[in-house]
Image (cartoon, rainbow, N blue to C red):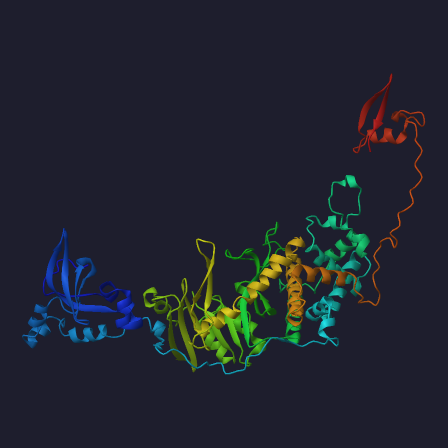
Amino acid sequence: MAPGLKVGDLVKAKAVNVLGNRRAGDVFGPWAAKSELHGSVIECVAVGRMRKLKVEWNECDDISILSARSLELDDLCTSVEAVEESTDSESSIDEEAGDSMDYSEGRQCDLEEPGVSQLRPHGTEWLVEMEGIQIDYYDGAKRNLDFIWTFDNPVEQRSPLEYFCAMFPMVEAAFWIEKTNARLAEMKRKPLSKCEYFRFWGLILAFSISSEKNRRNYWMEELDGESGRIFLPPAFGTRFGMGIRRFEDILRCLSFGDEDCNDPWSPIRPFMDALNNRRQQVINPSHMIVEDELMSSWISRKQDRTADGIPHRTKIIRKPKGVGTEIKCVADGLVVCIEICEGKEAESKKKWSHLPAGTAQTLRLSEPWHGTGRIIVADSAFSSVTTAIELKKCGLLFTGVVKTASREFPKEYLNDACTYRHEGDHICLTTIIDNCNLIALGWKDKTIKSFVSTCGTTQPGEPHKKHRYSKEGDIITTEIPRPQLVSQYFSASSKIDVHNHLRQGLLNIEDAWGTQTWWHRLAATFVGITVIDAMLAYNYERRVDAKSVEDFANDLALSLIFNKFDGYELVSRRRLSDEPIAAEPPIPAVPFEAHPLKSLLTLPKYKKNIGSKKGARRFVQPRGNDTMLTTSV
């Protein structure tokens, strides 16, 4: 607002305030939000008690009536009279300290494209592509997910156990059995065989199918009808050949490697490394790999800073189970590589630590596929201009959403809501940094989303379908147009979220296997990842008879419990015949006083315990005319 405006003053105002959003967009295009109109006041108009000004605009030859609050005094010149006075003599121009001298130069700056400063973030110049991107920088063939199996039998004959063994590090499992046997020997327990080892994992998996809250309830035997239970007890010991004491001994001695005082994650690191190596041997991902994070929930009763506490714990509020160990991973439906977030100090010692954290993690997780020309899709935790450039140097393409890591990225320009007229509109910018062609794209849905990419086009892609209910209860489907780059991103970005839902929401081994040992919780997470990957591979190759998580886990648990890895088959300890057992002869009734009662005071052991700390609890029980001293054991 400029106070004291009068006729003849030069003023300016935002184009959207004078012309409206629609007309300003037609006149100025994508720069409508930053454009300004310049004009002069030709008349003062009184509307009621309000004072308004009639302004004639230079750019559109329109005359409009606006309030003084919508106008600003043009900083080029205070009035037309000042301009005329400044041209009287050159000496007066010099004496005015160059105010009028800067008139033409300042006018030229205002006539530049609006938002020009936002198109040069941190000195990087971005160009607006009015025609969009029509040629995709990804010139490779689109490949599908593939597996490298050692199976000899047809797909129809493969069992869930075979898919689990293909995903589980079976070679390293022999070493883990030796480490577990060494700890069992220290406790003077019998050694563990391969068959019994995987039977143990079968019982762990069976926990996730049942609903018992107490682990020992799984070993309860059959009781009579007065036990108060509607369902029969699981009776794991009788049915599956492993008692509760043996199970707890194995659980207590479970080991995956030697502890290293220099590596706080040494109890679980061998499992993680073996899992990554096995994935690279078996899974050949498609041309598009997704990067995201998953959580291994951990809320311990012990303090985390104690000697046996978890080395590092992360809290993410937006996660359903957001307290625990954060694990970065890449996946193509199936998890193909994982990395534990070990803390700031440990991360600084890893490879590519001189780069930003999100960029370094992306390079480490995608290292097995460097030079293959695949596309990495990531969320805002990893996305930045630096990530896109460094991946391009390693022979990979990138597409991601930018939120906070916006250095050298035109975030303010893309997030200007006035630039987008309707849902589905987009703006495309390009630049070249270190011989890397970068694309910055803004797309408006319910909110504005900004993307940085080294591939993709702005040609029409698959629209976003919104399903809403009308007042009558009918489903109304609205299609929001989106470019091919955006539809390509959203077609793959949710793969790890779906995997997390299957592992944590449906299988949920972490909650079924209650523990106070932090690396046992991570082991449960890794086994859960293996089971879900085996199920996804099973359903991918056998789409006709695909199994649910519960059915697959049930079949796999039974196969692990009754496995034949040592060459013999477990026979459950149940009756071979359904014939009823012959009733035992009834016990003859015994009268109450089978022998004459004696006083406890006559027993030597009782006299001895009276004077000791252990003592003997006495109570007086009247019986007829006699008083007897009795003890309860």
Q: Is residue 148 above or below residue 263?
A: below
| Left or right placement of residue 230 versus residue 582 in this view | left
Residue in the picture at 20% in, 60% down: 70
The N terminus lies in quadrant: bottom left
Q: Position of residue 356 (x, y in %)?
A: 47, 70
Is residue 265 or residue 372 the one in the foreground? 372
Mark yes or no: residue 614 visible: yes
Residue 372, by quadrant, is bottom right
Q: Where's the C terminus, which quadrant? A: top right
Question: Residue at coordinates 54% horizontally, 78% vertically from top-left?
Answer: 374
The one of 346 and 534 positioned closer to us in this rendering: 534
Q: Residue at x 62, y 63 (%)?
A: 265
Left or right relative to 200: residue 375: left
**Is residue 353 visible to the viewer in this orientation of the structure?**
no
Q: Position of residue 575 (x, y in %)?
A: 87, 53
Quarter occupied by residue 43: bottom left
How far across and how far down the image is residue 622, in percent? 83, 20
The picture places residue 378, in percent across and down from the top left corner, at 50, 69
Along the line of sight, the residue nearer the viewer: 314 or 372: 372
Q: How many marks?
A: 0
* Up/down of 233 relative to 496, above or below: above
Place residue 510 in its image quadrant. bottom right
Q: Locate residue 19 relative to residue 552 in the image: left or right.
A: left
